[in-house]
Image: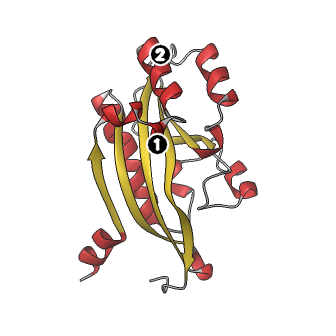
Amino acid sequence: DRGTMEQVRRLSARRSLLLLSTPAFAGARPLFELWQATRGELTEDVQSIMRASSVFQRMVVVRNPAGGARLIAQHFGAGIKVMRPCESLLTIDRDFHELHPDRDYVAWVAEAYAETLWRRRPHLESIRALIRMGASGTLVGRYDRLIMPWRSGSGDWFATALSIQRTAPVLSSIPDQ
């Protein structure tokens, strides 16, 4: 059945934040430590540090406007292979759900971001996903994702999601259904 196939296409498992102290997560550690030091407050200084970070190209940033339920894309790192770099630039200030041909995958990701914003605390998860890329096939990926909620002085909330590759993504010829 289609529901079971969709579950097989995307699996996630929570991981302990203590793993961020291991060498495998060395690139993510400074961003997490920044979140801890600022208690999740997104200031101009924090934004500058994020942009200068070595992991910025593997990061997605979405904004949840004060009093709303929408997620608006603010940054989609060019190092994330589900889009070409030129496509990622077109995502800025657009509804996050409009970003990709695999609407089911994007809805699943948005749900993880929304949950993190609701809980107001970071979480780390291991992901295995088959992502439909339209006519070009399906991207098979395995990665860890660190999602952190940030609050701004304007009352907006932001979620940053940092993807840490476990294996290089592979474009497969699995049919796009």
In this rendered view, identify the residue nearer to me: 18 or 109. 18
Disc 2 marks which residue?
A: 41
Amino acid type for the residue under numbered disc 1: Ala
Most extreme residue toward the right is: 86
Identify the image quadrant of the N terminus.
bottom left
> For this view, does 125 lie left or right of residue 44?
left
Q: Residue furthest front?
A: 23
Residue 172 position in % (x across, y down): 54, 80
Q: Residue at x 47, y 16 (%)?
A: 41
Give x and y (percent) for residue 74: 61, 38
Whichever of labels 1 and 2 marks the residue nearer the N terminus, that label is 1
Q: Residue visible at 28% across and 38% down?
A: 16
Q: Report the mark closest to the observer, 1 or 2.
A: 1
Q: Position of residue 92 (x, y in %)?
A: 66, 43
Q: Which mark is residue 24?
A: 1
Q: Is residue 110 above or below residue 3?
A: above
Callout 2 amino acid: Glu
> Can see residue 65?
no
Tell me the number on the disc at residue 140. Answer: none
Q: How many marks?
A: 2
Please say whether residue 160 is visible from this viewpoint: yes
| As drawn, 75 above or below 29 | below
Disc 2: CA contacts within 10 A as few (<14), some (14-19) or many (>=20) = some
